[in-house]
Image: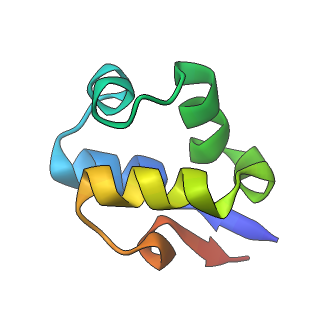
Amino acid sequence: MLKSRIKEVMEQKGVTIRQLVSMTGLSSGTLHRARGDLIGRCTLDTLATIAAALGVKTKALYEEA
């Protein structure tokens, strides 16, 4: 099971959901899913897009729980 760290990374970078939507082109629903318990349902492409926008590696967005 994966635990999302996206919210933490966003807070560290000072990025809001609205800003991340603009930066990634992803929907706010997708970003909310990725920030929560449903991160395991996100594709690697989605996580890579989020990671690139936040300037981190994809593996920084989650941890194994």
* Horizontal side, residue 45 vs residue 56: left or right: right
Q: Is residue 58 above or below residue 40?
A: below
Q: Residue at x 70, y 56 (%)?
A: 43
* Residue 32 point in image, percent of width and height: 59, 31
Q: Which sits in the foreground, 62 or 46?
A: 46
Please identify the quadrant where the C terminus is shown.
bottom right
Across and down, in percent, residue 17 comes to: 38, 27
Residue visible at 60% across and 76% down in the picture: 63
Position of residue 28 relative to residue 10, above or below, is: above
Q: Residue at x 67, y 37 (%)?
A: 33
Picture layout, residue 56 above or below residue 35: below
Question: Quadrant of the rendered structure where residue 14 is?
Answer: top left
Q: Is residue 54 left or right of residue 40?
A: left
Q: Is residue 28 left or right of residue 20?
A: right
Of residues 26 and 54, the one nearer the viewer is 26
The image shows residue 7 at horizontal and vertical percentages of: 43, 47
Picture colour scheme: rainbow
The image shows a total of numbered marks equal to 0
Residue that extends furthest to the left in the rendered view of this protein? 14
- In the rendered view, tell whether residue 48 sits above or below residue 28: below
Q: Residue at x 44, y 52 (%)?
A: 49
Q: Position of residue 50 (x, y in %)?
A: 42, 50
Q: Nearer the viewer, residue 35 or 27?
A: 27
Q: Quadrant of residue 23?
A: top left
Quarter that holds the N terminus? bottom right
